[in-house]
Amino acid sequence: MIVHKNDKLTDAFLLQQDGKYLEAIQHAQAQLVKAKVNMNVRDMLDAYVDLYYCYFNELLFEEALQVYEAHKKLFITTNDRADVMYHYVMSYMLYDVTKQYDAGIDALKKALAIATSIQAHHIVGLANCFIGALYTRKKQHNEALDYGTLGVAYIRTFAPNLTFYTLQCEICLAQIATSAHAFEQAAKIIDTIDLLQTLDKHQTLYLQFLFVKMRYLYVTNQLDVAQTFRETLIATVASTNDHVVAKLLVPTIKNALKHLPLQQELDFWENYEQTLQLAVTNETRSILKAFSLQQQTLLSEDHEEQTLLPKSLFFDRGQSLFELATKPLLLLICQMDTTDFSEQKRSYFQFHMLQQALDQFMHQFDTQHYISCHLTPHKFAVLFEYDAADVTHLHLPKTLSMELLGKTQNYPLYFSYTSTLTSRSNSFLEMYHLTESRLYQLVFH
């Protein structure tokens, strides 16, 4: 069960779809490390989301819960409605596995309200279908069908090109319809999906569909077809080696069989579940052994106490570059006016804003080779090679637009610069103090 705020599928997700779970976790953790090094809150939140799904889909619920709490602690500082929406979806997943269905429905309805307001069409469709699935668990089949049907209709209308999410909604509705004994509706969806030639490229989604169809065949008393199809399903699980997803889905078959006079079939699936459990245990142990230490390293930090890059290190690097440079150097210092939320001086939100400003400036200079330092939560310095003494022709940004407390606001940017082409400084430190004094005069005079 994967959804993203951005409707594009991430690299970690695509690795999971190929059954490369270790690689997916490794990729998500690497992205989180990179985001933390760069103090980029946007990338950190996205990495937490990927990591959460990696752990959740591997049945590593304790690790998933740790990531969930880290995401919650961080997204509060951004006040981004999309992050709040997505956290509600993450909450629903936890409520679902702990059988807190009412709480899950409430979380999804809150996510749905935000998704509707920001036109996150794939979330609107999925949230409706997931609400329907929870109503199915509560045996409220009329409500389940209403939400599931609405979700599929919505995503087909407003996001028809999002094939993966559309299929996810349709498979969910087929499951809901089967539970509600709306067999004609379920059969129509299953027959349509059966004709697709590309579904097996999405390994996890493909297995979900096979289990939904398997359950439908049992419930509609197509036993001969079901027994033949069962062998196809088992062979597919064996070929993909995706025991985790199969382990998650077997209970849907068992629950249906418990209400049918098919004890032999029920015995088969109970034995198969034990086989899967053994395989999953071995797989998750290897995953935990490989990544548990990295998990603790990534999540044990106290975000509020994380320190800036020491100025001394920046000055040492700057002096080395100053002495060894064969081309002209430009030192740029930028300060943001963030008085509207000065009480959050050490929050990641300001670091995120500052990183955005730095990215905008360096895009103008068209270089990726520079050294930089967050001097304070609202000021940075950057040093790089640049063969011009004047930068006024570049039209550097004077404001940065960011959303805060639900409103888009423009924050002033002040900057000063010094080039070795015009400066008579004998050291990088002199060059720095000259540039900072110019910035001081600009800001306060």
Image (cartoon, rainbow, N blue to C red):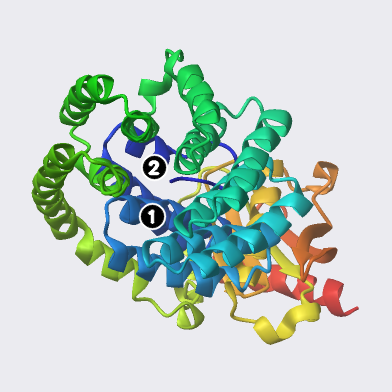
Q: Where is residue 174 in the image (x, y as percent from the top left)?
A: 49, 34
| Mark 2 Cα-neighbour bin, 10 Å: few <14, some 14–19, many ≥20 | many
Tag 2: amino acid: Ala
Q: Where is residue 73 in the image (x, y as percent from the top left)?
A: 51, 75
Mark seen at residue 51: 1
Residue at 33% x, 39% y: name it.
16
In the rendered view, tell whether residue 379 sits above or below residue 290: below
Gap between marks 2 and 1 measured at Cα: 8 Å
Q: Are the residues tagged 2 and 1 within 8 Å (C-beta)?
A: yes
Mark seen at residue 12: 2
* Quadrant in the picture for residue 154: top right
In this view of the protein, can residue 277 be seen by the observer?
A: yes
Q: Nearer the viewer, residue 348 or 184?
A: 184
Q: Where is residue 209 in the image (x, y as percent from the top left)?
A: 39, 31
In this view of the protein, can residue 320 be seen by the observer?
A: no
Q: Which of 216 and 120 is in front in this view?
A: 216
Residue at 45% x, 59% y: name it.
93
Q: Is mark 1 on a helix, strand or loop?
A: helix
* Lateral position of residue 253 relative to residue 283, left or right: right
Which callout, 2 or 1, points at the residue further toward the start of the chain? 2
Residue at 72% x, 54% y: name it.
422
Residue at 56% x, 26% y: name it.
163
* Lateral position of residue 56 relative to residue 84, left or right: left
The count of marks equals 2
Tag 1: amino acid: Leu
* Quadrant in the picture for residue 112: bottom right
> Which quadrant, please, contains the C terminus?
bottom right
In the rendered view, tell whether residue 47 sits above or below residue 163: below
Q: Position of residue 284 (x, y in %)?
A: 17, 54
Farthest front residue in view: 261
Q: What element carries label 2?
A: helix
Q: Nearer the viewer, residue 414 or 337?
A: 337
